[in-house]
Image (cartoon, rainbow, N blue to C red):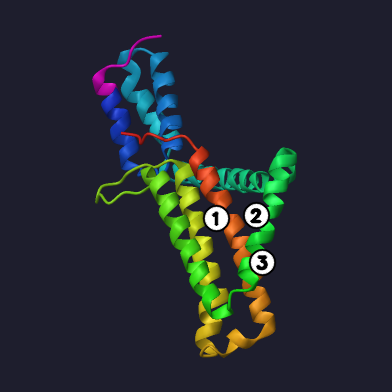
């Protein structure tokens, strides 16, 4: 096994940058594969080996790796959120605190008028968005050049969009279409209260998962 030259490393990084790999984890996996293969070969064979690796990790293959990783991590985060919400696994004190907190939350929301629940839900979205974006800002980029990001950070940020979607379809659109008259509908009031309660739980779990995820470094 030998140490790669600066030129070889430059070839690898240049190739990977040209593929616009979306996630750091995929970038590092491919980079490690290139390095391991080249370290076990002679320097004179590097150009031909890199050419073969370029064919192996073509644009379509890399995009497939990105999508597969998205799918797997999305499932993992859903499971983590559900596990976090299993308050009965937190011992007696955790169970008692969760029940009391949930009861107080339910009472507070059910006595709030439907027209004001929209504001409550909007606050939930803003707090969750601010918290997630602050903790997982490594997935944000305001640069014009391409940047690889952590899959976990990107997935967490996408989950904020679910709250926005719920807000639009459950609150805003019915209110606009009925010009606010639906706020006096008992079914709508109950539905908005229940949705708001679950949205609070969803937001708490999302913030908890985001805070537990380690900070990720971006690839070169």
Q: Name the residue under label 2.
A: 101
Q: Mark 1 points at which residue?
A: 203
Residue at x 71% of width, y 41% of height: 93
Could you give the CA–CA distance between mark 2 and mark 1, rounded to whole angstroms? Answer: 15 Å
| Residue 86 seen | no
Q: Nearer the viewer, residue 108 or 194?
A: 108
Could you give the CA–CA distance between mark 3 and mark 1, rounded to whole angstroms? Answer: 19 Å
Residue 167 lies, in percent from the top left, at 52, 70
Residue 92 lies, in percent from the top left, at 75, 40
Could you give the CA–CA distance between mark 2 and mark 3, rounded to whole angstroms? Answer: 10 Å
Q: How crowded is mark 1: few (under 14 residues within 10 Å), some or many (20 or more)?
A: many
Q: Say if mark 2 contacts mark 1, CB within 8 Å.
A: no
Is 214 part of what is drawn in magenta?
Answer: no
Q: Name the residue under label 3.
A: 107
Residue 116 lies, in percent from the top left, at 52, 76
Q: Nearer the viewer, residue 97 or 77?
A: 97
Q: Residues within 10 Å of mark 2 (few under 14, many from 20)?
A: few
Q: Which of 98 and 197 is in front in this view?
A: 98
């Amino acid at each position: 096994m030998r140490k790669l030259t600066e030129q070889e490393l430059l070839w690898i990084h240049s190739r990977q940058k040209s593929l616009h790999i979306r996630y750091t984890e995929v970038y590092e996996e491919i980079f490690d594969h290139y390095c391991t293969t080249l370290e076990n070969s002679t320097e004179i064979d590097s150009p031909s080996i890199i050419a073969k690796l370029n064919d192996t990790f073509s644009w379509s293959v890399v995009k497939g790796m990105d999508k597969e990783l998205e799918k797997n991590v999305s499932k993992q985060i859903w499971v983590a959120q559900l596990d976090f919400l299993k308050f009965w696994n937190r011992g007696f004190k955790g169970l008692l605190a969760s029940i009391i907190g949930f009861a107080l939350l339910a009472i507070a929301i059910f006595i709030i008028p439907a027209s004001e629940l929209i504001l409550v839900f909007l606050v939930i979205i803003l707090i969750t968005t601010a918290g997630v974006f602050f903790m997982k800002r490594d997935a944000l980029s305001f640069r014009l050049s391409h940047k690889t990001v952590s899959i976990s950070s990107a997935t967490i940020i996408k989950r904020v969009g679910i709250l926005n979607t719920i807000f639009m379809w459950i609150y805003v659109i019915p209110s606009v279409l009925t010009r606010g008259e639906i706020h006096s509908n008992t079914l709508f009031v109950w539905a908005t209260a229940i949705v708001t309660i679950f949205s609070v739980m969803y937001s708490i779990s999302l913030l908890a998962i985001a805070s537990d995820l380690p900070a990720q470094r971006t690839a070169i």
